[in-house]
Image (cartoon, rainbow, N blue to C red):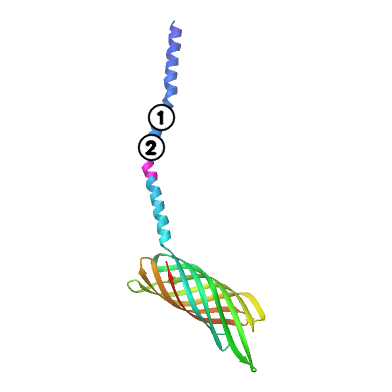
Amino acid sequence: MNKQKSLIQLLFFLMIFSMTPLFSQEIDIDSLEEQEPVEQEFTVAETGLESQFIDNVHIFLNSLIIFPLSVYEKGFGLGETITFQYKLPFKLNIGFETGYYGFKSEAETDGYSVVGGYSIIPVLAQASYDFKIVENIYVTPVLKLGFGYTSAALNGWLEDSTFSAMFEGGVRLKGVVSGSLIIQGNVTYTGLIEKSGIFSILSLGFGFGL
């Protein structure tokens, strides 16, 4: 009888001991449920960072009047560019730009008229810095580096296409009009580095950005 009693007591203690982890698991689940608000706060913080990143991204559309400096005596053309820009601290901006420049130039050679048609597709990385003049008005020096895909035709029949290293330097005058709308005017010098030398262009531009 004593042996049976001892055996029953041992089984009873073993059963209580085996149930102890179940109680501890319930306590852990309750503590995890109490931590849910912290996870929600982290999600809100992530959303705030995304919103701040989007606010610092700007897109500019710019129209150009082009005056070639390195070809024939008379030259004129038009261009369009699109610029993607990210605003860093201390009013420094970085981004990239692409677009299309198209222009013609004409000259008299030995009594014959020679007309050159030219086009450039630029792909440029850029950096700029905003100097504040008055409230919402800035003067912005800009430097761009990259390459341009150029094609040329003389009198409409002789064609040549090539990739050339390209750089641009200029100044923008820009102002914040309403909310996030920005308007700008700019003067830009463009240089294409070719085997024969630097092909130069001067352009005047006007555009807007968001």
Tell me the quarter of the picture where residue 199 sits: bottom right
Task: Reply yes or no: does residue 35 show up in magenta.
Answer: yes
Chain part drawn in magenta: 31-39
Q: Mark 1 — residue?
A: 24
Residue that protrudes farthest toward the front in the picture:
156
Considering the whole magenta stretch, tell me its main secondary structure.
helix
Q: Amino acid at mark 1?
A: Ser
Looking at the rendered structure, the secondary structure element under dot 1 is: helix
Earlier-in-chain disc, 1 versus 2: 1
Q: Is residue 9 left or right of residue 148?
A: left
As displayed, is residue 20 above or below residue 169? above
Q: Is residue 178 left or right of residue 194?
A: left
From the image, state whether disc 1 or disc 2 is nearer to you: 2
Looking at the rendered structure, the secondary structure element under dot 2 is: helix
The reply to whether callout 1 and callout 2 are in contact (CB within 8 Å) is: no
Give 134 or 117, whichever is nearer the viewer. Answer: 117
Please give the label number shown on residue 33.
2
Task: Reply yes or no: does residue 10 show up in magenta.
Answer: no
Residue that protrudes farthest toward the right in the picture:
158
Q: Tell me which residue sits at (56%, 75%) in the image.
A: 166
Q: Looking at the figure, which quarter contains the N terminus?
A: top left
